[in-house]
Image (cartoon, grey):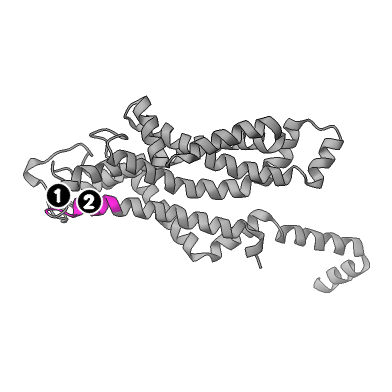
């Protein structure tokens, strides 16, 4: 059978050529190449494991712990880690593991929606500035420059001070301060793409600007956007924790990690575990997203592919 197939391919060059083209297309699939690069990157895999762990912890928090995040036990205040309370208790007798598990929900929720909001508005503004240029570019770029002139946490504090202290307002503030980061990234990418031959050819054929942006500009701008979004998740979670620590984010009794640090800072010497575990949780989640972002950047960078 194999001999007959070889003879058929030898006598039918077009079939052989078709098979070779199919193999080349399959091998050169961008998604497949990216996944292969990620599988080879141990740091990226480590990042995925960390984030998946905290996702599971947050989603299944009611199953993983018998306590509620508001449950107080004055008898067992500042209890050291034990079989009953795996990570100990805080100054009100609340189980720290339970609060960290529920806090994972809050941190990932804030990180996700803040980055998605910043991504959407930043991408739209960046495309408009980079594609249309002239006064539109000047106006949007000056707005970005003004926002970036302030330290990010200071600008977030100002926004929360105007809107009021709450988790939702902290989310809005974090989204606002990250808009210019996405906007400038997309703008620079669009400026380089708008002079490409396929874009100029589409314009010459009379294709409308909206279709050019949708079918040519945006798809070719996705790689840096994806990388920045992944890195932005960690940054947003860190900013949310900073606002919570300052009392401008989630309000009691919400088990937000930054707020947990603030509530426990007076017990650093007496009960250090009340600060260590929330702090380590923040560090691990930020590290996980950074490792994934670095892995995606390497996988999507043509210079890193052999």
Q: Residues within 10 Å of mark 2 (few under 14, many from 20)?
A: many
Q: Is residue 231 left or right of residue 27?
A: left
Disc marking residue 22: none
**Where is the C terminus found, in terms of image quarters?**
bottom right
Q: What kind of element bears circle 1?
A: helix
Q: Position of residue 174 (x, y in %)?
A: 43, 37
Q: Is residue 292 above or below residue 173?
A: below
Magenta stretch, residue numbers: 270-279
Residue depicted at x 51% and y 54%: 293
**Observer-nearest of 71 and 160:** 160
Q: Which residue is mark 1?
A: 267
Q: Is residue 274 left or right of residue 207?
A: left
Residue depicted at x 36% and y 42%: 107
Residue depicted at x 62% and y 56%: 300
Q: Is residue 96 above or below residue 163?
A: below
Q: Which residue is mark 2?
A: 275
Q: Residues within 10 Å of mark 1 (few under 14, many from 20)?
A: some
| Residue 179 appearing in the image | yes
Which image quarter: residue 219? top right
Contact (Cβ within 8 Å) of mark 2 with mark 1: yes
**Observer-nearest of 106 and 64:** 106
């Amino acid at each position: 059978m194999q001999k007959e197939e070889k003879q058929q391919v030898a006598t039918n060059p077009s079939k052989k050529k078709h098979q070779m083209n199919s193999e080349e297309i399959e091998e050169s699939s961008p998604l497949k190449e990216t996944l292969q690069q990620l599988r080879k990157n141990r740091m990226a895999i480590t990042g995925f494991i960390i984030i998946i762990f905290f996702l599971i912890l947050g989603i299944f928090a009611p199953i993983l712990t018998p306590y509620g995040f508001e449950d107080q036990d004055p008898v067992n205040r500042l209890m050291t880690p034990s079989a009953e309370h795996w990570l100990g208790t805080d100054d009100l007798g609340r189980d720290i593991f339970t609060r960290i598990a529920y806090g994972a929900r809050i941190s990932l929720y804030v990180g996700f929606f803040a980055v998605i909001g910043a991504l959407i508005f930043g991408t739209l503004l960046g495309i408009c500035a980079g594609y249309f240029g002239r006064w539109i570019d000047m106006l949007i770029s000056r707005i970005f420059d003004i926002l970036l002139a302030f330290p990010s946490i200071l600008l977030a504090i100002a926004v929360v001070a105007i809107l009021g202290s709450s988790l939702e307002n902290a989310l809005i503030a974090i989204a606002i301060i990250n808009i210019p980061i996405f906007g400038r990234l997309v703008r620079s990418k669009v400026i380089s793409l708008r002079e490409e031959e396929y874009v100029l050819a589409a314009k010459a054929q009379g294709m409308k600007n909206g279709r050019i942006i949708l079918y040519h500009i945006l798809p070719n701008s996705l790689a840096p956007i994806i990388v920045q979004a992944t890195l932005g998740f960690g940054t947003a979670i860190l900013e949310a924790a900073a606002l919570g620590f300052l009392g401008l984010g989630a309000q009691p009794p919400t088990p937000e990690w930054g707020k947990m640090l603030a509530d426990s800072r007076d017990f650093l010497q007496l009960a250090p575990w009340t600060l260590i575990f929330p702090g380590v949780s923040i560090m691990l989640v930020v590290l996980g997203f950074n490792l994934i972002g670095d892995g995606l950047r390497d996988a999507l960078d043509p210079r890193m592919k052999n």
